[in-house]
Each structure stands twice: as structure tokens, then as C-alpha cells.
Image (tube, helix red, strand yellow):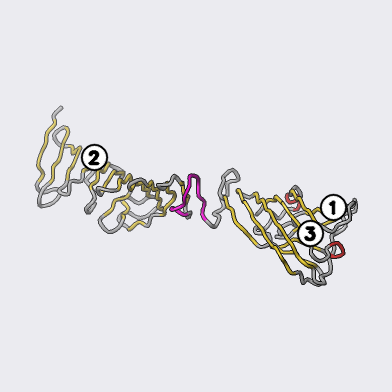
Amino acid sequence: MATQVTLNSGSVDSAGSLALKTNGTTTAVTIDTSQNVGIGATPSAWGTIKALEFSGGTSVASDGTAVQLTSNAYYNGTNWIYKNSAGAGNYYINNNTHNWRIAASGTAGNTISFTQAMTLNANGVLALQGASTSANGVGITFPATQSASSDANTLDDYEEGTFTPTIVYSGTNTPTYTYQLGRYTKVGRIVQLQMFFSWNENGSTGNVTVGNLPFTSVTSFARSVPSILSLGLTGLPVNLSVTGIVSSNSTTIPLYLNDNAGTTLSATYTDNDQDMYVTVTYEAV
């Protein structure tokens, strides 16, 4: 079996390229005048990047700083270009940051617009698509707005934040607040809230509801029933306590007396200078 090295002065460009052949006729390796190397393939026009390109469109390339591992794409000095009519992917290390990018299927020769699918930054944060790539600490960062997965077994959201809960009277609704504080943690569809109110009812009348929860509950009432509600309300008779259930497909919690009759909590039991602490867990849509 014969092997030879030949200088091809016409098949690649006018200045010539180096071709390594097997069997005397089959080109195995091509090195073009930009020092790009093709194994079983003619190197694409990579601009100033130096690349090692394989048949099928996969490549390893570098501009001297970042290292690129790419599928079905090459960089022509201005844009990323589809090598073949299919999807494309790109992974690169730039200093101490790792980046994963994806592109939907496109036509060979067309420009690619990559989407940053994931980043591992220098702080040790793995940022998913749409999340902050400059976050501090070590952990997984989700985008600020949830991109819900259709797969029930996929963790697609983690959030922490604050909100402003309200006390709502069904009749005259004129409460004023000294404190009106809310914090939440959301993991997937499970929401856990802590709330503290200090308010005057100011002549409010009717039944009492906690309102303005940060996430809408699930539609099925049966799935809202297991909500865990721990509530402390001053001013109640010693023999009474208060409970509540997150309403179905809602951002409210109607309140009830634990009196064996499920009596709704009314303004009768919330005089002025009233404090209330609420902790609740429920399932969001």
C-alpha cells in the first residue's frame, strides 16, 4: 500500500496546498495556505481562526485565546456558517469560562445565529439559557422568567424574592398597614411563602382574604387542598384559631375559623392594630 506527500498547486488555491494521500490517489489530509487542516475534508474558509476540520462538518478551532469544538459550522471571519443543511452546535472555552451554544436546523451556506444554552462561569455558577452569566457563588442559575418544561420530571425553575401581600375585605375594604411583608421561594411548581401583616381595618367590613400571592395556584381545587397554612392572628378569642386554603386558579387565601363549622373570618375578629403571620405552601400552575 503506497503513501505519498504531494504539493497540489491548483486544486485548492493559486498558492497551493499540502495534501497527504493514501493509495496514491485518496486525499487523507489537506493543509491549506491559512494553515487550516482537513481530515477527509477540504478545510472551510475559517478567516483568521486556525481549525482542524473533519469530514461531516465537525471541527476543533482556536483564535489563540478561545478553543472551539463545533458541529456543522465554521466561522468565516465575520459570521458562523452552516456547513451542511442540519442543526449546529458549538462549545468553547474562553479563559476560564465554558460556553455551550445551539442553533436550529438551517441551510448549508447560510449564517448561523447561535443561542447560548448554558454557561459555566469563572465563579462556578452553571447558568442555564436566559440566566445571568455573571452570577456569583457556586450553583445553578435559572432565567428570571421561567421557561416551563412539558416534562413533569424536569426541574425548570428556582426563584427567591419578595412581594407585597394584601388583606382584602369583601365589603368595605379600607385597611392601612404598618407592615406588609412577603417573601417567597419557588422550586419547580412548589411555592413556599412567608407573610407578616400589621394593619388597621379602618372600618372595613365583610369576610377577610389574603391576596396578591406571587404565583397563581393550580386549577384543580383538589390539588390546592394540601396547602400548609400556619397562621397567627392576635385579637381572637382564646378558644378560636384561623386557617385557610389557597383558592383554585387564584392568588388568594380565604380565611376561616377553626370552629368545626368552617365559619369565614370576618371583620368582627380583626379590630384595629391587628398583627398576622402566615406561612403557606401550594402548587402553582
State the SS at label 3: strand
Q: Position of residue 210 (x, y in %)?
A: 75, 61
Residue bearing mark 2: 40
- Residue 145 lies left or right of residue 255; in this view the side is left
Q: Position of residue 121 (x, y in %)?
A: 41, 48
State the SS at label 1: loop
User: Residues under labels 2 and 3: Cα distance?
Assistant: 70 Å
Residue bearing mark 3: 254
Mark positioned earlier in the residue sequence (1 or 2):
2
Residue 136 inside the magenta-drawn segment: yes
Q: Nearer the viewer, mark 1 or mark 2?
A: 1
Q: Residue, x 81% and y 70% (percent of image)? A: 204
User: Magenta span covers which residues?
Assistant: 132-143
How dense is the environment of label 2, judged by Cα within 10 Å: few (below 14), some, or many (20 and up)? some
Q: Quadrant of the C terminus?
A: bottom right
- Residue 270 lies left or right of residue 125; in this view the side is right
